[in-house]
Image: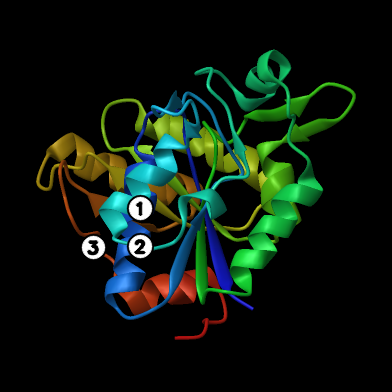
């Protein structure tokens, strides 16, 4: 059975997909068979045949170099660029936890590690009709530890602390923070890093600069964050 890690963030468009791709790439380059998974992805485009293509998954596939089939990466793919609960209301096919778990567990049987990406920020309605599924429900259903991705710039202290407090209140296991768009030596961003650690009690495990093709965390440390250590 694979080890897994869930990548969430302080909001949308803060670099979760980019960071997730670098994490998958890191483990693969170290020789560990690693899959990508995202339960629900919205804001996607259609190919020439009219088929919806999960853009985040395609990006991770390209950056990480994985040969994992695209169709195994995202069970729920929506066209509208809105929260999954609203996209499903418009397009049909609302998220079922049983389907998400089954596809994730199938990947766990085929790969040593599975890096999962969340939708939006941590407070994201995945389904909101007669059944209510929030993002934390998916994390708990998959039984995964988490890392939080945040932009390194102005305002990140507030967003990181609030995100972490919400996650702690909902019983989620946070293993580390990752700062994106980080400029080493920038006095504000260096202080943001320090204050995020001090105010949350959670370490910054990596910082990612613009256009980085690697992430400054070793594969062994990343494996230890995922859990017990998977098969090579």
Question: Residue reaching furthest bottom?
Answer: 232
| Residue visible at 38% across and 39% down in the picture | 150
Mark with earlier residue (2, 3): 2
Q: Nearer the viewer, residue 51 or 138?
A: 51
Q: Which residue is mark 3?
A: 216
Q: Which residue is mark 1?
A: 61
> Are the residues flagged by discs 2 and 1 in contact, CB closer than 8 Å?
yes
Asked if 130 appears above or below 160 in the picture, the reply is above
Horizontal side, residue 35 vs residue 131: left or right:
left
Question: Residue reaching furthest right?
Answer: 130
Q: Report x, y in % for residue 113.
A: 50, 71
Q: Which residue is mark 2?
A: 66
* Secondary element type, mark 3: loop
Image quarter where the C terminus lies is: bottom left
Mark with earlier residue (2, 1): 1
Horizontal side, residue 94 vs residue 120: left or right:
right
The residue mark sitting in front, 2 or 3, is 2
Task: Measure the alpha-carbon separation of dots 2 and 1.
Answer: 5 Å
Task: Measure the alpha-carbon separation of dots 3 and 1.
Answer: 20 Å
The residue mark sitting in front, 3 or 1, is 1
Label 2: few (<14), some (14–19) or many (≥20) C-alpha neighbours in 10 Å: some
Mark with earlier residue (3, 1): 1
| Residue visible at 47% across and 34% down in the picture | 10
């Amino acid at each position: 059975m694979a080890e897994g890690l869930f990548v969430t963030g302080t909001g949308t468009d803060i670099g979760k997909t980019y960071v997730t791709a670098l994490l998958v790439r890191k483990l693969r380059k170290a020789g560990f068979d690693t899959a990508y998974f995202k339960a629900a992805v919205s804001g996607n485009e259609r190919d020439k045949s009219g088929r919806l293509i999960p853009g985040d998954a395609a990006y991770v596939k390209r950056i990480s170099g994985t040969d994992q089939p695209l169709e195994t990466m995202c069970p729920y793919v929506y066209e509208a660029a809105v929260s999954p609960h609203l996209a499903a209301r418009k397009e049909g096919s609302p998220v079922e936890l049983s389907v998400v778990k089954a596809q994730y567990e199938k990947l766990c049987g085929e790969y040593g590690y599975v890096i999962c990406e969340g939708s939006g920020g941590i407070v994201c309605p995945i389904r909101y009709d007669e059944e209510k599924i929030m993002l934390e429900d998916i994390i708990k259903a998959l039984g995964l530890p988490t890392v939080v991705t945040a932009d390194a710039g102005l305002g990140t202290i507030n967003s990181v602390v609030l995100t972490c407090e919400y996650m702690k209140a909902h019983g989620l296991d946070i293993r580390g923070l990752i700062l994106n768009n980080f400029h080493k030596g920038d006095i504000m961003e260096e202080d943001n890093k320090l204050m995020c650690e001090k105010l949350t009690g959670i370490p910054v495990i990596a910082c990612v600069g613009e256009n980085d093709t690697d992430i400054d965390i070793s594969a062994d440390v990343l494996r230890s964050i995922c859990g017990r250590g998977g098969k090579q």
